[in-house]
Image: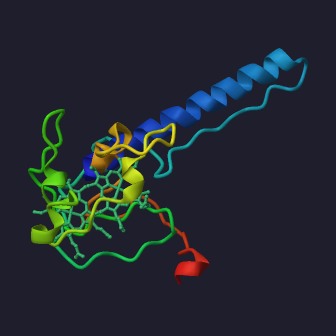
Amino acid sequence: MRLQQTLSHAGLVVAVAFVAALGAGMAVAAGPAKAQEVKLQGLRGGTPLNRDNPPTASHQERDHAVSDRDFVQQPPLIPHTTAGYQITRNFNKCMDCHAWQKTKTSGATKVSVTHFRNREGQELDNVSPRRYFCTQCHVAQTDAKPLVENTFQRARGLQ
Ligand code: HEC
Ligand code: HEC
């Protein structure tokens, strides 16, 4: 998890660098505007993966009650471990418990009705392909330390 975060962080820095480079290119194309010096710095400073800050092992939190949401459209966080839960083309472990017919016995929340709609707004008779890979949006929590400080405030309607 920590490694993933670190890698995606590196991705972000690259993306920022790319956008900045694009911006610089456009400024040149637009005319004689002074070329601005762009100073890039990773959020944590330094190279994300070096000997000074190696990724440490982190563990998924134990199963707990569902978490409060921070904004209305938030994909709810996964309140249980997902170790070993596979999602492949032919098999989706999450649906073993979250499919509507399975929730009676599993006690899990039914997969949201919005997940049956395709991008054209058409209602399907099963989970839409764009909602198939659950962990694209729903994430389990780990005990990893936050990489950077965070001042995010919960939406007022949910406080
Ligand atoms: C063995 C059964 C089982 C499997 C497999 C399973 N879940 Fe769950 N899930 C549950 C149960 C039980 C709850 C808790 C419901 C409660 O406490 O109200 C839950 C809760 C959740 C919630 C919180 C819903 C909310 O309203 O906050 C999410 C999100 C979720 N699971 C996603 C997943 C994803 C994604 C996978 C696959 C990687 C998965 N689950 C696999 C049983 C399962
Ligand atoms: C593209 C992002 C995305 C994907 C992929 C996705 N979800 Fe969700 N999910 C959401 C969002 C956003 C919400 C909250 C708003 C809503 O209900 O649409 C949600 C809500 C839920 C809920 C709570 C429903 C409720 O009534 O409170 C469950 C359970 C859930 N998803 C399970 C799943 C499972 C299982 C999968 C995989 C089959 C999945 N989701 C795939 C974004 C996603």
Residue 66 place in picture, x, y as percent: 29, 75
Q: Is residue 142 left or right of residue 22?
A: left
Residue 60 position (above or below residue 121): below
- Give the residue displayed 71% in from the left and 28% down from the top: 23
Residue 154 lies, with reference to residue 5, above or below; the image says below
Q: Where does the image place residue 86, in percent across and percent down from the top left?
A: 13, 44
Depth order, front residue of 86/6: 86
- Residue 68, picture quadrant: bottom left
Q: Which residue is drawn at 26% across and 68% down?
A: 109
Figure check: 16 above or below 75 = above
Residue at 50% across / 43% down in the picture?
121
Relative depth, front residue between 35 and 6: 6
Give the tally of numbered discs: 0
Query: Which x, y percent locates residue 44?
Result: 46, 52
Q: Which residue lies furthest to the bottom in this view?
A: 159
Q: Which of 19 and 135 is in front in this view?
A: 135
Left or right of 103 on screen, residue 9: right
Which residue is located at x 57 percent, y 36 percent? 16
Question: Do we see residue 130 in this rendering?
Answer: yes
